[in-house]
Image: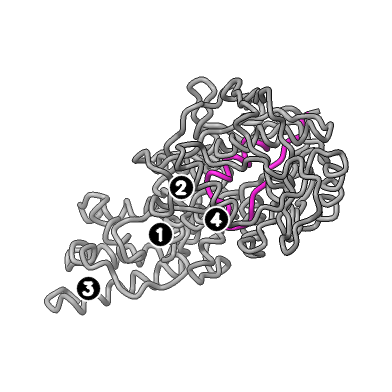
Amino acid sequence: MVKTRFAPSPTGYLHIGGARTALFSWLFARHHGGPFVLRIEDTDLERSTPAAVNAILEGMNWLGLDYDEGPFYQTQRFDRYREVLQQLLRSGQAYYCYCTREELEALRSEQMTRKEKPRYDGRYRDYQGPPRTGVEPVVRFKNPLSGSVVVEDLIRGNIIFQNSELDDLIIARADGTPTYNFCVVVDDMDMGITHVIRGDDHINNTPRQINILKALGAPVPQYGHVPMILAPDGQKLSKRHGAASVMEYRDLGYLPEAVLNYLVRLGWSHGDQEIFSLDEMVSAFDLGGCNKAPSAINPSKLIWLNKHYLKTLDPAHVARHLSWHIGQLDIDPSTGPALPEVVRAFAERSDTLRDMAQAAVFLYREFDDYDAKAASKNLTPAALEPLRQVHAALRALSSWQAEPIHEVIKQVATTAGLALGKVAQPLRVAISGTAVSPPIDITLQLLGQARTLARIERALAYIERHSPLAEK
């Protein structure tokens, strides 16, 4: 049975690279019908924070990456790590190292002077003497001195490491706390992880972890190291390149479906297909489709995907995400049209949910003033009579639906001998404050009869105030 895990360190938010790793691990498990584990690697007590843990859980939840086991916290497993540590010490596969920091720094300096690779020289590897007074020892793993470790990477192919190049790794600090590489091994062993999918920044950790697993007599998982994500300019991704955390993408107005589709195509392909539903991702995903080279983010691609999902997903589903953005504008959506109807009306002209929410504010709240350019062009003396006629005809409407609304506007234009736009555009500015909205009949239907009439009256008063020579 396939079993994968996502194991972030809670020292910051769930960033886009971590989210892609989580997605790939989740998809691989789902594709093979196996469980997916969430593990919080919080042994870095100085940098790990509850806020970062919450951010990871919130990001996973927003993306919809559900986990079958966990979240497990390494800080709650220290007794287990000590147990395995003692096992390695008893079997002679680990030892106490009494080197002081000064001695290690001197060793490093000597090696660099000789142009050698800085590394621990194993001086306490076979030490049988008494403990050194005044020195709190670390525990090191006794790495094999010869032979090689072959990492059968599912993405990159075989990667060979010579044991002679690997020094004896510290697996417990002087204060007794276990180190990252040791905790990972014990967790993967205890949790029965069969496949480890992670960033390629972990490649050098892998042979060390394999050697510890073998020393414990544990099965060795299969590994797949995913290349890093680069900025559009090919540089290392950083905050200056835009959204740093997954939740920032939510705040910017992206749908989780768009972000997932975007992430899966960052370094993985399935023929020429660009659009993937979650079910399609699960069905098609395999590590053989992963690129070996890094992938660069492409903000325009994410916007394109987001527009696609705004237009094609169930409006009721999109509305649930839109509701959060409406709330961020201090608007109670119950004071205006139903949000699924807003989605239907605005999806074609919106890049993001944030755009959509801001464009729809006039449906829920009175605007302070008209857009100056739109008003000067459309709220003119020439618009006065057509607006009066539209107001009268709309007030008499018994069915407030788009079709009869459209007929009213069309009839007023025909009677006045005007192009439809000469009536519709002043009406649009009158009711929305700007020159841009969905089709005017749909916009009026959403706004409601009472608000529409009140806003036309307001526009008429505006024209009269600003055009003293206009007919009264």
User: Which residue, given by chain and number where applicable, does mark 4 sit on?
Assistant: 247
Q: Which residue is mark 3?
A: 463
Disc 1 target residue = 359
First reached walking from the N terminus: tag 1 or tag 4 = 4
Which span is picked out in magenta? 2-26
Q: Mark 2 = which residue?
A: 347
Q: Residue at x 74, y 30 (%)?
A: 221
Give the amino acid at mark 4: Met
| Residue at (22, 49) in percent of width and height | 419
In the picture, the quarter occupied by the N terminus is: top right
Q: Nearer the viewer, residue 321 or 291?
A: 291
Report, in whole angstroms, how far the alpha carbon at label 1 lies from the one at label 3: 24 Å
Q: Cα distance, mark 2 to mark 4?
A: 22 Å
Gap between marks 2 and 1, in whole Å? 11 Å
Residue 71 visible here: yes
The reply to whether callout 1 and callout 4 are in contact (CB within 8 Å) is no
What is the crowding at mark 3: few (fewer than 14 residues within 10 Å), some, or many (at least 20)?
many
